[in-house]
């Protein structure tokens, strides 16, 4: 009886985190969404990290307030299920010449 209980505890300790791992690791794949779905997700959440390719990802934002104060927003295009170039949102970038024009 003790052995069975300890085996059950071990299985629970190892199986539960493994079962939850794919859900935690998964991020939206912009290539599997329509342009409207991807754009709406960024608008709804404000900032979203999405898979953009087999080994690539990007953080898309809906507004300047989701960037650091010294960064600027730049329109970001990505390939979606229905469009090869969809304006998903913006990305945060550091200006080339910080302080230029101040």
Image (cartoon, grey):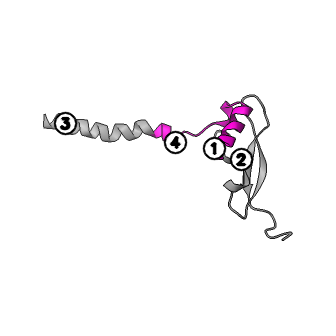
Q: Residues within 10 Å of mark 2 (few under 14, many from 20)?
A: many
Image mark for residue 5: 3
Q: Return the residue found at the far top.
A: 82
Report how far apart the C-alphas of labels 2 and 4 lie in the structure: 23 Å
Image mark for residue 11: none
Mark 2 vs mark 3: in front: 2
Residue holding disc 1: 45
Q: Residues within 10 Å of mark 3 (few under 14, many from 20)?
A: few
Question: Tag 4 or tag 2, which sits nearer the N-term?
Answer: 4
Front-most of residues 78 and 68: 68
Chief secondary structure of the magenta portion: helix
Magenta segment range? 21-50
Q: Image quadrant for the C terminus?
A: bottom right
For the residues bearing labels 2 and 4, Cβ distance under 8 angstroms: no
Q: Image quadrant for the N terminus?
A: top left
Residue holding disc 4: 25
């Amino acid at each position: 009886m003790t052995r069975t209980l300890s085996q059950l505890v071990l299985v629970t300790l190892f199986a539960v985190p493994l079962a939850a791992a794919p859900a935690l690791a998964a991020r939206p794949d912009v290539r599997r969404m329509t342009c409207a779905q991807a754009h709406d997700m960024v608008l709804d959440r404000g900032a979203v990290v999405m898979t953009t390719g087999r080994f690539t990802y990007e953080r898309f934002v809906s507004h300047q307030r989701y960037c650091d104060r010294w960064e600027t927003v730049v329109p970001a295009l990505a390939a979606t299920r229905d469009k090869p170039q969809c304006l998903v949102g913006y990305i945060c970038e550091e200006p080339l010449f910080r302080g230029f024009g101040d």
